[in-house]
Amino acid sequence: MSKVCYGKILVVEDDSAIRETLKVWLNRSGFTTLFAVKGDEGLHAFRRENPDLVILDVMLPEIDGLEFKLHRSI
């Protein structure tokens, strides 16, 4: 039986415990998950992967969440 995918979610979070918790819950819920640890990595992943949703930490290394929002192109 094939796994149902409800969408692609990009999580940009530098805290490994939070990332792992989100990974478990989102994958169990049928979402494809992508992860980035720093804001600049998240911005590149956003542009490359075109996710359906972004879960974005505001306090990130390199580019913070607010700056990420300003740089994204939709």
Image (cartoon, helix red, strand yellow):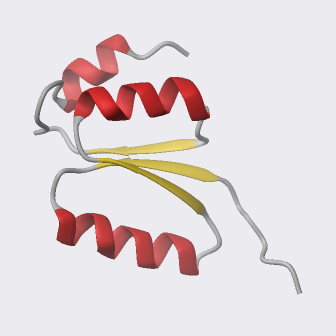
Image quadrant in which you'd find residue 27: bottom right
Q: Residue furthest right?
A: 1
Image quadrant in which you'd find residue 65: top left
Residue at 37%, 69% (x, y): give it.
22
Query: Where is residue 19 drawn, in percent x and y?
Result: 29, 64
Q: Is residue 31 above or below residue 49?
A: below
Q: Is residue 35 above or below residue 24?
A: above
Query: Where is residue 73 drawn, in percent x and y?
Result: 49, 12
Instruction: Specify whether 48 is left or right of 39.
Output: right
Question: From the image, which quarter does the N terminus lie in?
Answer: bottom right
Residue at 31%, 13% (x, y): give it.
70
Query: Where is residue 69 drawn, in percent x and y?
Result: 32, 22
Instruction: Please tell me which residue lies in front, 16 or 6.
Output: 16
Instruction: Specify whether 17 is left or right of 70.
Output: left
Q: Is residue 45 above or below residue 67?
A: below
Instruction: Please tell me which residue lies in front, 10 or 53.
Output: 10
Query: Where is residue 13 drawn, in percent x and y?
Result: 24, 50
Question: From the image, which quarter does the C terminus lie in?
Answer: top right
